[in-house]
Image (spheres, rainbow, N blue to C red):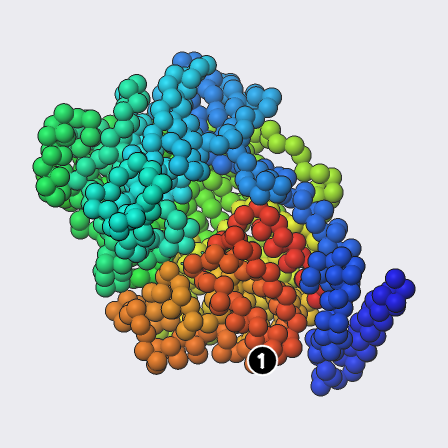
Amino acid sequence: MVAICSGIQSYYSSIAAAADIYRSVSSACACAPTRGSLLRRSISNSKVMASDHASQGLPSGMDPSMLDEYASQSKLLQEFFKIPSIGKAWIFNSKNENTSRAMVSIGQSDLLANKKRNFLLNSHISKSTSKSVSFQWSPFPIEMNGVSAVVPSPSGEKLLLVRNAEDDSPTKFEIWGPCQLENEIHIAQSIHGSLYTDGWFEGISWNQEETFIAYVAEEPPQPKPEFNGSGYRKEASSQKDCKSWKGQGDWEDDWGETYSKKRIPALFAANISSGEVRAVNGITRSLSVGQVIWAPSSSYSLVFVAWSDDNGFQETPRKLGIKYCYNRPCALYAAPDPFKEDADKQSTDSNQGDTTAIVKLTAELSSAFFPRFSPDGKYLVFISAKSSVDSGAHNGTNSMHKIDWPADGKIEGSFSVNDVVPIIASPQLGCFPGIYCSGLLRFPWLSDGRTMILSSYWGSKEAILSVNVASGEVLRVSPQDSDYSWNVLALDNNNILAVSSSLVTPPQIYYGFEASQIDKSCHWDWQGIPSPFPKLSDKVSSLLVNHKFSVLKIPISNASDKLPDGAKLPFEAIFVSCKDSASSPTIVVLHGGPHSVYPSSYSKSLAFLHAQGYNLLVVNYRGSLGFGEEALQSLPGNIGSQDVNDVLTALEFVIKKGLVDASRVAVVGGSHGGFLTTHLIGQAPETFVAAAARNPVCNLSLMVGTTDIPEWCFLEIYGKEGKSCFTESPSADMLTQFYQKSPISHISKVKTPTLFLLGAKDLRVPVSNGLQYARTLKERKVETKTIVFPEDMHGLDKPRSDYESFLNIGVWFKKYTSK
Ligand SMILES: CC(=O)N[C@@H](C)C(=O)N[C@@H](C)C(=O)O
């Protein structure tokens, strides 16, 4: 034992010695060896310690010098993982207008089960005439164990619980009444597989009469070639026959990241009382469907979104990744309800391959999704990402449109589409920046039947908007003077149930009473609702209490005249500062996409890092959502330069204001945020003392041949031309350009200790990208630590992986930002 200890001693002493030398030298002259190189020399000895790790039973790679830090941080992080998150909510009116009932879905990470557990919490709402409201929460939540989807009926008198099977057993529908199970439907896998609950293809919708449910589920398993002792069996059998086996058959494209194990999304309807299930006919397998709703009485009672297989840049018949990708062409279609008599007659036609059964409603638009009928059925309103499809950028500024729905329900083909809210190119400062919508309520309408309430990004914040689909007027409903983010949860007639939070302040539920103003415009008085959740532990509260939080406007440094006005507007950075920020270490946090945004809403992982005593500088560089289309489109073709400079400009902004200690800055980012992180430690090697990257894009010439979105490399490197020059096999010149614009082209200058967090099942930025970069750093004796999560995909969002990722980020940054 002693020997080992002395080894440890000498190890620590060499560290300490090195550090003392460092401290003394660095202050002397600039040419002194950097802190890193001194430490590296000493730490590289750590390899010899590996055997000691094992002998001390320490996990491989565990740095003994940070053991206590690891232990204390792991304990604190558990506190943050216990804080539940608010999911969806529904409000059911009751006969007495002063009362209503609410149902809220709650999520909580379960590290032991490595899954997110979902609960339902109910509340009775009583509203007094004096515009005050009280919520009587039910004493305990009900766990939705094994429940994949919760879908109340429009009247709130029925509740559908969907139980997807994890094996070959049937999918189950439970239809609950107010106090008993009214019906249970078991659907065999030969009819269809699991219902989609991914928030994109997902669609489960009651008809108005609450007698049928239309939904999107995996198509039934497709026939595979079957063989037995005498070879190929011409007539395949559904019966299990122990003497035969199934082959693979032809390989088929899939929708990439997170969808590789899913079968094609198809449309079905179920009769609630008989339990009969029918497929909606006339939809070929080249169309993947989603987001189905019921149309007001018409021969075509189902409206849904569909994406065709040939959605490549050249409309080549090839599925590309669709997760986080709004640039996939899609349209609204209508189809007859398969239970309607005449539908049967028609379907026989369709079996002869005639697809007249379904009608494309939005042929003139390249993108249409989130369809919603106005309460009187006169309008079919929907969101479009045509800016994204037409430009090729994977996300962009949305627009809103409407179709006048024929009163007689007669559908004779595509409709003329009217604009409701256009794409905003360059917003006036502080004015409406356009719609950036990631979802709509099932019933988003105020009682005037013309005003829709939705959540959308407004700069670095999420805001609640009202959109009058008749006039196109857009108003910000959530408080204007707040940098907090606001999200609509549900509507209670014209009152709004919402949730508000900041990056490090957990969500708080609010109830907004509609109050008409003199100028007839609506505004809402917001009342905080006592949270049903347990208070933050004193320890967590004490660590978060002194924070300051503001959204900084960062002016563009020496903007080129060629830039459109919208791209010259200041971009934003969210700054969360500790009590004495100038003497605290700072973490620069970078979102991916790049056409995404890091909003000011609560993030348990960033709250954990801030609680560790770090300032946070979350940079929403140009290209982010929420700032108008011109700013967004200024990035494609300039990645690795404009975005990198925006981050350095934001950091310089807070350094010049004396808000941060420039010698203790770390940087973290995932995917394109990892692209920026590894570019920054290469292009600005003196600026960052530590870095962490989640599935980073480090080498586009490697990514283009391995990712499910190869066109992303073309679009972000070449800009709009990327759409026309995309090819499955880029030329050597193209690969060279991809390499030169990649972080790996600057790797020779990197000396920042870097932590890599990689998902082995990542189809978006396959693990080879980050591993190549990490191995090269190791080869160059730069301090690295790499954790590969074998079961994780691009998002690393399994609870244990998320936990271990941020625990290691916390310890890694503590090690290298400590004075
Ligand atoms: C469109 C897309 O997935 N781009 C990746 C390179 C990326 O950065 N993805 C984001 C959403 C991420 O954070 O993973």
Task: Choose top left, top right, bottom left or bottom right for residue 108.
Answer: top right
* Rendered position, 163 above or below 483: above
Foreground residue among 221 and 751: 221
Q: What residue type is labelled 1?
A: Lys
Instruction: Say whether residue 492 is visible.
Output: no
Foreground residue among 407 and 199: 199
Dividing the image into 4 quarters, which one contains the C terminus?
Answer: bottom right
Q: How crowded is mark 1: few (under 14 residues within 10 Å), some or many (20 or more)?
A: some
Instruction: Say whether residue 6 is visible.
Output: yes
Question: Left or right of 544: which side holds 434?
Answer: left
Residue beneath the point at 52% across and 23% down: 122
* Residue annotated with mark 1: 749
Q: How many labels does the image show?
A: 1
Q: Can you give x and y, in whole percent of width and height, for residue 615 in the image?
A: 65, 57
* Rendered position, 43 above or below 278: below
Task: Choose top left, top right, bottom left or bottom right for residue 455.
Answer: top left
Q: Is mark 1 on a helix, strand or loop?
A: helix
Ligand 1 within 8 Å of the CB at mark 1 = no
Task: Choose top left, top right, bottom left or bottom right for residue 535.
Answer: top right
Q: Can you give x and y, in whole percent of width and height, for residue 377 in the image?
A: 23, 30
Dividing the image into 4 quarters, which one contains the N terminus?
Answer: bottom right
Question: Left or right of 769: which side holds 667?
Answer: right
Q: Ligand 1 is found in which quarter of the picture? A: bottom left
Residue beneath the point at 78% across and 55% down: 68
Residue beneath the point at 23% across and 37% down: 303
Residue beneath the point at 24% across and 46% down: 233
Q: Residue furthest front?
A: 230
Q: Can you give x and y, in whole percent of width and height, for residue 586 in the image?
A: 65, 62
Question: Left or right of 281: which side holds 327?
Answer: right
Foreground residue among 381 and 733: 733
Q: Can you give x and y, in whole percent of width and height, for residue 747 in the image?
A: 55, 77
